[in-house]
Image: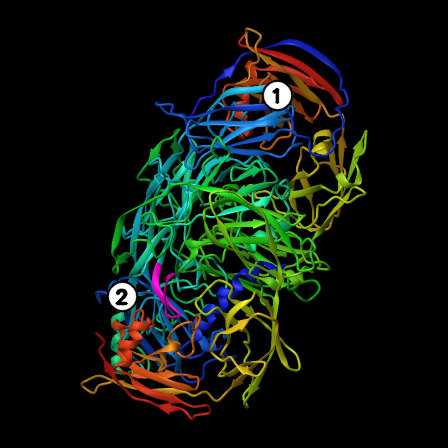
């Protein structure tokens, strides 16, 4: 049961790890204390990233990640003085993590060029005492306003979200690339219908009121049924209230659950026609791409955002789930996904019970395999399985199925829909370590979707004589992304002997012959960045991307072939490993790096970039770069 | 309190005592859809009395024999439920930012009265009103007067614990708890009238890895800068002052934020309560937070078996007279996991009185099987100084219970849906499963290792028909009465506990009428012991009920004895735990005597 409770967080966590490891020096904890005399010092200042002004009384935290587990390892938490200055003494040589936190600002870790961006460790030689360590913090912006319904009445207690416009795998997408759920901007309207999203980074946003309906067989809600509760928890429905509660409305054999922070639908018309509030983007759009973008500067406040929600007619979609052998499946959670979710990256948005989803409707079949989905507006949908953790079904002794069936909904009820369940596909393989060092402590494979579509999955290895892994998946396109840690890097991934390293493969049958090969001899690339005057640049960013423009999109969440590295205090950048191939490399000032993975930006960067070719088993390369200005 | 209840003179108009008739046996099956209906309109309780649209109205069957129903009012505020079997129903109305309204309640947030419907009856044109909730809003600032964003603010209502009857705090609405925004503002809404405390809870959780803050002065920074630039082999800073504070060190003045009550005090007893009227908006309820000196509490746990069980956890919980209030405010202390060598540590502990408790498991669920039931406890006073507190584990006490039934016997299936929960003092209304308490088919239940203390017990019985039929008559533990007195668990003294149920409990029934002989339904009926020694919080000899829409009322299962019966025009939930109220009621009460296994029927006329 402990595993069950933790499972919904696994996938986001894996992505987080992957992002953290990307491009930055790998630090895995080591037993023992840091060696050497403790004669070093660090003196520095916390400043506002936009103005450079000191930020008084910020909290500064220092740790030594490599020796974190040792009780004698230096660590501290100080409050900076009135001019944002801080210091730490008695430090041995080593690498330090330094972070500043201040209310109203995004926290700043040493080396960061943008909020929530890549970070560096402070490298301290024995007895070294730098006095110029600057920690930047980023002042949050605010988007505030009111949600009103069709009668002009303020809407109370509903969730309002802001999604930042970004580029994901080469396409414009809305979402929050920060997968830490606590950081996803979400607010709840108060008794005046007012909301205030107050932890926003500079950028362009769409603001929306998400709406979703959930339909469950009424018999399951007569008394507390933990099976129903668990199944719905796993699809993001955290609150299940019984019949006769304010958020549960029975309609025949099924009951409509309205999640907390979602609008309760209006009562049906006299003729029994239902209406629902659809997901609404500011000012009153149905999709993110049709919404009005709100551009926000650092520390800017926009307080005039009025979102008008109005009900639309909705019908009921009902039918029957049929297992491949024609039998009746156990109660199964299903979902209709419509336009409200298009162009939205949902990773990190729908991971917890408290996070209101974007899917139009979620449902559950009854003991006879029948389902009804109440409150479906007209539109084009895909009916899918809702359980993202197919392997959980197997652990519970049930069959794991997936569904992907287009459903077109018009003005009338859809009934007698026959929905064919397809057996989940097996994804299995083995891991080989080719090298002399000890295999890493951390292993696992994320199967990313090429454009961030929902359905990313994770395979945990089963330890044995040979390291194997297995998981279950729905059909579709995936990119295998094995973890890279402990000095080991992916050399190749093959499926049935065919190379699928860093590229999408079609999963339309069981894939049981995946081989992941690791090497401990990475093709490391490093160098020094200098500016036009010939002095080293401590604030540059080095960008590396493939020469082939076909590889500028569809590469999933954490591409290894599009990567960036920060320069250190000494102007040195390091890329731990680049897969073999032809690349462009360019060093630019930190101000120019937002949305650099946009293919249009890559095209502009390519004209000034240096080419770089990496072959398998290359020795470490040195590539010095001159700082370029992009306009 | 901020309202005045009206005590009503009542006169007994008939008195019949007799042997109780057996209630008709019911089963658990759902009753087939019926032919009665209930409909009406919800209005906004303000000067305009407009119909209230989009109100969720719920209907529940008092006997629990049919599932509840829910509907939504239309733009005219109307609602309707059809197809109802005959029975008694409660109606409630909900709307965000408004106060929950129960049909027949005199005010928002009060207990309602059941509606009695017969087969085929159409109860129409019921009128309900809902009032806007009150608002409390303000700004949280630090000692420098700067607004502090992102802090957890709880606006909590003073009330009574449903189990212990003690004064405590609780969140009255979903809009009553939230974070301060970027301007340091909080806004609690949907608040029923009553007394409130405002509490700011910092994002501090004690345990390993949560270091205290060391405040750097400008002078210290200047010294450090000089030392760094001079390249001196050691900085010219006094040792023990500028050193990094390692997690386990006691050097340096350490500070942290502690929970603060409006207007800016750490002691809940010194907090200023806010009296909020119906739909009142109170602004400017500001709070000033402050840093307090913190301490580290650490120690070693020793065990009779030599090793500390891995499932052992250590909790640091507030102690003293205000624990019930603090627990109601969600301030239940911290939990830490001992290290394998048996040491434990709590960092960032604010000043105050605490109890350190070592328990198996988290205390909220059953401990893992085959784990010895061990416990330890120690009281400490913290005032900024670090403390070393050794703990010695002792065996927990086995509580072996059984239920016996006088008269007819429940089925084994019914029995197995019965369970017992022990509620320790100072729990703030949260029930703690003590690892056990489920009744088996033979009527036995156990708690494997209970920490010595005094407990109240509550039961849940998920068989509606059985729950209706049987009432607890007596409870005896190791020869001590434990139904009305707390269940006492002494060290090293296993408890042999018997709970006796009866299907012929005492019963008091009757009809309330007005002067014209019509059903009088708007009153709160309080039945309480005539013996003042029973006027204690959570007393089993004080009971509140409401008449149904036909004026009938019924109170079952009070211990036999002499009682007062009083009628009030208004009564806040739990207020009967206040003996001064009961004292005021005595002179206008009627006296009734309840006898073992008997139903006493008394009708009453209001106002004479």
Determine crowd level at label 2: few under 14, some 14-19, many 20+ residues with C-alpha closer than 10 A. Answer: many
Q: Is residue A479 left or right of residue B135?
A: right
Look at the image and name its color scheme. rainbow
The boundaries of the magenta stretch are A164-175
The residue pinned by badge 1 equals B117
- Depth order, front residue of B57/B474: B57
Residue at screen point 58% across, 32% down: B537
How many numbered marks are there?
2
Image x and y of residue A50, in percent: 23, 65
Q: Quadrant of residue B589?
A: top right
Question: What's the distance in space between the residues labelled 2 and 1, CA to CA?
Answer: 71 Å
Image x and y of residue A601, in percent: 29, 73
Q: Is residue A535 left or right of residue B538?
A: left
- Chain to which mark 2 belongs: A
The residue pinned by badge 2 equals A84
Q: Is residue B408 left or right of residue B351?
A: right
**Magenta stretch contains residue A161:** no
Image x and y of residue B165, in percent: 57, 34
Q: Main secondary structure of the magenta part?
A: strand
- Depth order, front residue of B137/B293: B137
Judging from the image, what secondary structure is the residue with disc 1 in?
Answer: strand
Image vertical order of residue B485 relative to residue B186, above or below: above
Asked if residue A60 can be seen in this view, the reply is no
- Chain to which mark 1 belongs: B
The reply to whether the C-beta atoms of the residues labelled 2 and 1 are less than 8 Å apart is: no
Image x and y of residue A525, in percent: 38, 87
Check the picture and name the quadrant holding the N terminus of chain A. bottom right
**Residue A329, numbered label:** none
């Amino acid at each position: 049961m402990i595993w069950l409770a933790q499972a919904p967080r696994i996938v986001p966590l894996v992505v987080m790890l992957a992002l953290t490891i990307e491009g930055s020096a790998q630090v895995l904890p080591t037993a023992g204390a840091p060696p050497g005399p403790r004669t070093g010092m660090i003196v520095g200042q916390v400043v506002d990233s936009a103005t450079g002004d000191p930020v008084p009384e910020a909290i500064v935290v220092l740790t030594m990640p490599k020796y974190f587990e040792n009780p004698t390892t230096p660590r501290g938490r100080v409050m900076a003085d009135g001019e944002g200055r801080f210091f730490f003494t008695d430090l041995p040589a080593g690498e330090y993590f330094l972070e500043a936190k201040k209310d109203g600002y995004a926290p700043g870790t040493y080396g960061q060029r943008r909020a929530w961006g890549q970070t560096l460790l402070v490298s301290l030689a024995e007895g070294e005492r730098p006095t110029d360590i600057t920690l930047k913090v980023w002042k949050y912006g605010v988007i505030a306003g009111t949600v009103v319904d069709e009668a002009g009445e303020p809407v109370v207690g509903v969730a309002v979200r802001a999604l930042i416009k970004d580029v994901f795998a080469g396409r414009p997408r809305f979402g929050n690339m920060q997968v830490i759920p606590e950081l996803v901007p979400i607010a709840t309207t108060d008794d005046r219908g007012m909301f205030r999203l107050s932890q926003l980074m500079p950028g362009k946003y769409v603001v929306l009121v998400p709406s979703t309906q959930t339909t469950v067989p009424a018999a399951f809600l007569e008394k507390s049924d933990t099976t129903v509760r668990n199944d719905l928890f796993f699809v993001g429905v955290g609150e299940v209230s019984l019949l006769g509660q304010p958020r549960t409305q029975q309609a025949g054999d099924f009951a409509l659950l309205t999640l907390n922070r979602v609008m309760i639908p209006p009562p049906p018309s006299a003729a029994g026609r239902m209406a629902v509030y659809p997901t609404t983007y500011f000012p009153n759009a149905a999709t993110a791409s049709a919404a009005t973008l709100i551009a926000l500067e650092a520390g800017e406040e926009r307080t005039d955002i009025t979102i008008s929600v109005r009900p639309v007619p909705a019908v009921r979609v009902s039918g029957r789930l049929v297992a491949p052998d024609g039998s009746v499946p156990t109660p199964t959670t299903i979902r209709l996904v419509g336009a409200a979710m298009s162009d939205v990256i949902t990773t990190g948005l729908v991971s917890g019970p408290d996070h209101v989803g974007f899917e139009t409707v979620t449902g559950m079949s009854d003991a006879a395999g029948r389902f009804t989905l109440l409150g479906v507006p007209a539109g084009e949908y895909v009916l899918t399985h809702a359980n993202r953790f197919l392997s959980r079904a197997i652990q519970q002794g049930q069959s794991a199925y997936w569904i992907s069936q287009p459903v077109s909904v018009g003005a009338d009820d859809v009934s007698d829909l026959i929905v064919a369940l397809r057996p989940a596909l097996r994804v299995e393989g083995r891991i080989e370590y080719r090298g002399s060092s000890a295999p890493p402590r951390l292993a696992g494979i994320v199967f990313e979707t090429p454009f961030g579509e929902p359905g990313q999955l994770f395979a945990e290895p089963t330890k044995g004589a040979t390291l194997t892994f297995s998981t279950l998946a729905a059909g579709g396109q995936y990119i295998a992304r094995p973890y890279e840690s402990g000095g080991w890097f992916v050399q190749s991934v093959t499926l049935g002997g065919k190379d699928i390293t860093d590229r999408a493969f079609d999963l339309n049958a069981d894939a049981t012959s995946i081989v992941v090969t690791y090497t401990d001899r990475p093709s490391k690339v490093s160098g020094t960045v200098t500016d036009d005057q010939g002095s080293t640049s401590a604030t540059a960013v080095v960008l590396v991307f493939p020469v082939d423009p076909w590889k500028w999109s569809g590469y999933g969440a954490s591409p290894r072939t599009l990567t960036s590295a920060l320069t250190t205090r000494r102007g040195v950048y390091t890329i731990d490993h680049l897969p073999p191939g032809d690349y462009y490399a360019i060093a630019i000032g930190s101000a120019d790096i937002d949305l650099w993975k946009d293919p249009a930006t890559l095209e502009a960067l390519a004209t000034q970039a240096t080419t770089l070719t990496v072959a398998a088993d290359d020795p470490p390369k040195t590539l010095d770069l001159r700082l370029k200005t992009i306009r | 309190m901020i309202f005045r209840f009206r005590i009503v003179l009542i006169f007994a108009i008939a008195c019949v005592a007799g042997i109780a008739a057996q209630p008709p046996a019911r089963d658990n099956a759902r009753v087939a859809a019926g032919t009665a209906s209930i409909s009406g309109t919800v209005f906004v309780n303000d000067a305009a009395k407009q119909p209230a649209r989009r109100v969720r109205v719920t209907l529940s069957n008092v006997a629990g024999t049919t599932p509840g129903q829910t509907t939504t009012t239309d733009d005219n505020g109307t609602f309707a439920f059809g197809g109802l079997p005959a029975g008694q129903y409660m109606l409630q109305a909900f709307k965000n930012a408004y106060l929950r309204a129960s049909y027949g309640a005199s005010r928002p947030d009060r207990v309602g009265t059941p509606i009695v419907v017969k087969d085929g009856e159409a109860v129409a044109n019921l009128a309900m009103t809902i009032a806007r909730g009150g608002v409390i809003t303000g700004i949280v600032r630090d000692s420098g007067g700067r607004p502090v964003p992102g802090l957890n603010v709880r606006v909590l209502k003073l009330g009574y614990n449903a189990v212990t009857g003690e004064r405590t705090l609780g969140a009255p609405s979903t809009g009553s708890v939230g974070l301060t925004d970027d301007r340091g503002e909080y806004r609690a809404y949907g608040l029923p009238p009553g007394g409130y405390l405002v509490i700011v809870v910092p994002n501090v959780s004690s345990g390993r890895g949560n270091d205290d803050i060391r405040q750097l002065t400008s002078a210290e920074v200047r010294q450090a800068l000089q030392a760094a630039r001079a390249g001196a082999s050691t900085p010219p800073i006094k040792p023990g002052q500028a050193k990094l504070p390692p997690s386990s060190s006691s050097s340096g003045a350490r500070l942290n934020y502690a929970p603060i009550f409006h207007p800016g005090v750490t002691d809940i007893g010194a907090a200023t309560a806010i009296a909020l009227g119906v739909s009142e908006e109170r602004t400017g309820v500001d709070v000033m937070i402050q840093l307090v000196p913190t301490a580290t509490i650490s120690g070693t746990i020793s065990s009779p078996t030599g090793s500390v069980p891995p499932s052992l956890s250590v909790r640091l919980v507030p102690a003293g007279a205000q624990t019930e209030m603090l627990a109601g405010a969600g301030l239940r202390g911290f939990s830490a996991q001992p290290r394998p060598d048996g040491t434990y540590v709590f960092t960032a502990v604010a000043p105050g009185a605490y109890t350190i408790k070592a328990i198996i498991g988290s205390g909220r669920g059953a401990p893992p099987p085959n784990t010895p039931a061990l416990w330890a406890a120690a009281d400490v006073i913290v005032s900024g100084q670090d403390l070393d507190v050794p703990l010695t584990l002792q065996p927990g006490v086995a509580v072996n219970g059984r239920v016996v039934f006088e008269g007819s016997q429940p089925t084994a299936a019914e029995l197995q849906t019965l369970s017992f929960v022990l509620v320790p003092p100072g729990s703030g209304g949260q029930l703690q499963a003590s690892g056990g308490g489920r009744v088996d088919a033979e009527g036995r239940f156990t708690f494997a290792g209970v920490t010595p203390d005094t407990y109240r017990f509550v039961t849940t019985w998920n068989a509606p028909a059985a729950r209706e039929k049987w009432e607890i008559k007596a409870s005896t533990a190791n020869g001590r009465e434990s139904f009305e007195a707390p269940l006492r668990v002494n060290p090293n003294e296993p408890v042999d506990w018997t709970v006796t149920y009866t299907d012929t409990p005492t019963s008091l029934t009757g009809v309330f009428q007005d002067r014209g002989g019509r059903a009088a339904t708007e009153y709160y009926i309080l039945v309480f012991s005539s013996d003042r020694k029973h006027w204690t919080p959570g007393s089993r000899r004080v009971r509140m009920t409401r008449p149904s829409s036909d004026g009938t009322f019924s109170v079952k299962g009070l211990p036999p004895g002499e009682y007062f019966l009083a009628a009030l025009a208004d009564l806040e939930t739990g207020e009967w735990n206040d003996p001064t109220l009961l004292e005021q009621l005595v002179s206008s009460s009627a006296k009734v005597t309840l006898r073992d296994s008997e139903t006493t029927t008394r009708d009453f006329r209001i106002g004479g």
